[in-house]
Amino acid sequence: MTETANILVIDDEEAILDSCSQVLKKEGFRVKYAQNGIEGLKAIIEETFQVVLLDLRMPGPSGMDILTKIKEGNPEIPVIIITGFATIESAVDAIKRGAFDYLAKPFSPGELRVIVHKALESRKIYFENIHLRKELKDRIQFDMIVGKSPAMNAVFEMVRRVSPTDSTVLITGESGTGKELLAREIHKHSLRKESSFVVVDCGALVETLFESELFGHVKGSFTGAIETKHGRFEVANGGTIFLDEISNISLNIQAKLLRVIQEREVTRIGSTKPIKVDIRILAATNENLAECVRHGQFRDDLFYRLSVVPIHLPPLRERKQDIPLLVGHFLQKYNIKTKKSIRNISSTVRKALSEYNWPGNIRELENTIERAVVLSADDEIRLEDLIYHGISSSFSLLTPVGGKYKTMEQIENEYIATVLHAHQGNRSHTAKALGIDRKTLLSKIKKYNLS
Ligand SMILES: Nc1ncnc2c1ncn2[C@@H]1O[C@H](COP(=O)(O)OP(=O)(O)OP(=O)(O)O)[C@@H](O)[C@H]1O
Ligand SMILES: [Mg+2]
């Protein structure tokens, strides 16, 4: 950018125009001149300039007025004021009106070079900031939890009340109902919001690794422990720890977790020295934990400790009023992501989206809209764009063939095939969308000979 920068000099004094031009051209810049403010403004409309050098005292409108006009229309252009009547007051005034800096005549070629390079740099930062701010805005906007059903309003009310406290919250709900999003929301509205939010997926690691992941270990405490490691509880110190899929933890780790909750301290594997931790615990599960307790798979004392405040996210099929709002939300999100501007969704599509039962809940709805946005050829989403998902095929799935109704197995077979296809064969995503675990999915894929 620096080499090809286009610079406009607005000054009525030929000598200044000449010397600026010489110095700046030597730097590899392109230089244009204007003899007065009006000409200068015209040039700015016709061409893009990266920097403007502006004389304060010229015939016609004053440099100050021209400065104001330039900044109104082009806040990104740094304007360097040059004047022969250098006084502190006019400098301060110009900078108050948005000038980048001030150069007093006579100035040396070196001074000019330095100030122009600085101005170019400031322009770059201006654009970077705009970009960051926009990204931040998009992120904030799309991290939002959307919903207006009575069920979601009750959830929002709970979040409002519980966020500023340090209470442990147990979030329950089927896969894809927004448990993690809700946990983040609680953290965002808590007093710990400036500290970290640490997610632990309790189903992801084998027992021994998981234990050291949570509590850390000291060097040499087991084979492979070549370095001392801080556990996630230590990392989350001062902030919030989110224990996702909590039903997956073993009884052994449940006992250790209980101790952490009661004592608010962790002991690294291989150490005897407990470390104090200041943490807020949020947990989530798509299993019925009370049921797990009854089956002896989950400690009742831990269950009660975790579910101080239980929040249940109902499945999407029980809050269909939220569907239009969610569709609009995801449409906007993926329009921005894909730089499209799809505004129209035909009434058939709206109806199909509202009637479908969404076994994969909001995640499935989001994926469906994302794919429809990607697939749509113009500014409308049609039923064909939903073709790769459970939806449009759900009609054919349920349609009797030759007057004969399908068996449950036939429907299951066709449905799994449809959802697998919709997830490009990705089994984890398919299992999630179907709300079953991966093992069950794999056995069904084998049973129906799907691939
Ligand atoms: N109410 C909502 N408004 C907007 N987006 C939502 C809402 N609920 C969920 N989402 C989005 O749906 C997707 C799935 O949500 P999330 O990962 O929080 O679900 P989950 O309940 O944790 O699922 P799983 O049990 O499968 O881990 C995310 O992209 C999330 O941003
Ligand atoms: Mg989750």
Image (spheres, helix red, strand yellow):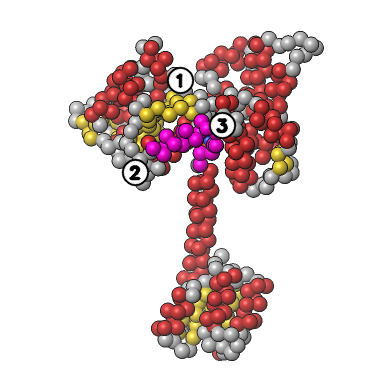
Label of residue 191 in the image: 2
Point out the stretch of residues depicted in magenta.
144-161
Which secondary structure lies at badge 2?
loop
- Coordinates of residue 222 in the picture (x, y in percent): 28, 24
**Chief secondary structure of the magenta span?**
helix
| Amino acid type of the residue tagged 3 in the rendering | Ile
Indicate the quadrant containing the N terminus: top left, top right, bottom left or bottom right: bottom right
Q: Earlier in the sequence, mark 2 or mark 3?
A: 2
| Amino acid type of the residue tagged 1 in the rendering | Glu
Gap in Å between the C-alphas at discs 2 and 3?
Answer: 28 Å
Q: Is residue 428 left or right of residue 381?
A: left
Label 2, ligand 1: CB separation under 8 Å: no
Residue at coordinates 65% horizontally, 19% vertically from top-left?
415
Name which quarter of the figure residue 2 lies in: bottom right
Marks 3/1 in contact by CB < 8 Å: the verdict is: no
Estimate how packed mark 2 is, as few (under 14), some (14 to 19) or many (20 or more) residues with alpha carbons within 10 Å.
some
Q: Earlier in the sequence, mark 3 or mark 1?
A: 1
Label 3, ligand 1: CB separation under 8 Å: yes
Marks 2/1 in contact by CB < 8 Å: the verdict is: no
Residue at coordinates 54% horizontally, 26% vertically from top-left?
315
**Mark 1, residue position:** 287
Decide which of 11, 60 is in the foreground and name it. Answer: 60
**Mark 3, residue position:** 362
Q: Which residue of the protein is positioned furthest toward the right in this rendering?
A: 402
- Coordinates of residue 409 in the picture (x, y in percent): 65, 11
Which secondary structure lies at badge 1?
loop
